[in-house]
Structures are given as C-alpha cells and as structure tokens.
Image (cartoon, rainbow, N blue to C red):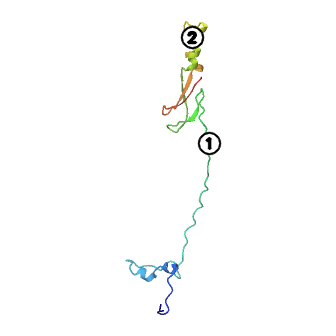
Amino acid sequence: MESKGPSAPPPTYVDSMQPPSYQAATDSLPYPAGPPMGAPGVPVTPYPPQPAAAPVVVQTVYVQPRQLGFQPTQTTCASCNQLVLTHVVYTPGALTWLSCGGLFLVGCWLGCCLIPFCIDGLKDVEHFCPNCRTNIGACRRL
C-alpha cells in the first residue's frame, strides 16, 4: 500500500465529548445569552450542601405462634390486622358431655347432670375479633 502522506490521528473519546463552541450554541437563541459558566470573571456558585442521609435502622420482628387460652387474649387479628383483646364465647365440648354422662351414671339423673352445661370452666372457648367478628381460633378442653 502506498502512503498518502501524514494522516491525522483518529479522534479520542475525550475529543468527541467536547461541547460545541459557545458562540455556535448561542447564535440560535431567541434571547441574549449571558457569559458561559466558568468564563473568566463569572463566579461559579456551588450547590448548597445536602443534608446527610438518615441512618437506616433494621428491625427484626419475631413472630410467635398465637397462644390462645381459656381467657380473653390480646392478639393481632389476621383479618383486620388490628391488635385486639379477643371476645370469647363458651361452647359445650367433649369435656362438658363427658361430665354430664359421668354425673348421670353416678345417679344425678333428675336434671343435676345438666350442671356442666352451666359451668364455663368445662366448656370449650372460641376467640373472636371484637372489630370484624372473625373467628380467630379456639381452645378445646379435651
């Protein structure tokens, strides 16, 4: 190949990123342009200092299984996500019926065998949310 003379080096990345001249950029403006930023005699005002970012706090939440007992319990309702004191309803369960049958066999057959149905301590407990009336859970005696 023949050499056609000295050639100019290819443009570098920095050369290609140079902005066009100030005069060429301001010729097409519909209003008079001021001097460019950083021109001699033009003070450059820095941006005001930004406030420091707040530190990030990481909080670990341990979820314990619901421990519903035989009394009203403070818990979070799964339906309405509110922290509530449960409303309890006592319902006859297996222990109530076994107590009734035991009293009947002992000889309390004239209605005294029905006393376990009047004692809340022998009944099962169902917990309800007082806000949305959702059944949260139950606690069985047997």
Q: Where 107 sits versus 31, above or below? A: above
Task: Look at the image and tell me in which quarter the C terminus lies.
Answer: top right
For mark 2, does the 10 Å Cα neighbourhood hold few (<14), some (14 to 19), or many (20 or more) residues? some
| 115 vs 107, nearest the viewer | 107
Residue kind at label 2, given as amino acid type:
Cys
Residue kind at label 1, given as amino acid type:
Tyr
Q: Position of residue 80 (x, y in %)?
A: 50, 38
Instruction: Identify the residue at image location x=59%, y=9%.
Output: 105
Q: Which residue is mark 2?
A: 113
Q: Where 115 sits versus 47, above or below? A: above
Answer with the quarter of the image where residue 122 lies: top right
Q: Is residue 118 visible?
A: no
Instruction: Identify the residue at image location x=60%, y=54%.
Output: 56
Answer with the quarter of the image where residue 113 lies: top right
| 82 vs 63, nearest the viewer | 63
Instruction: Tell me, for residue 62, which label it has, or none.
Output: 1
Q: Position of residue 6 (x, y in %)?
A: 50, 92
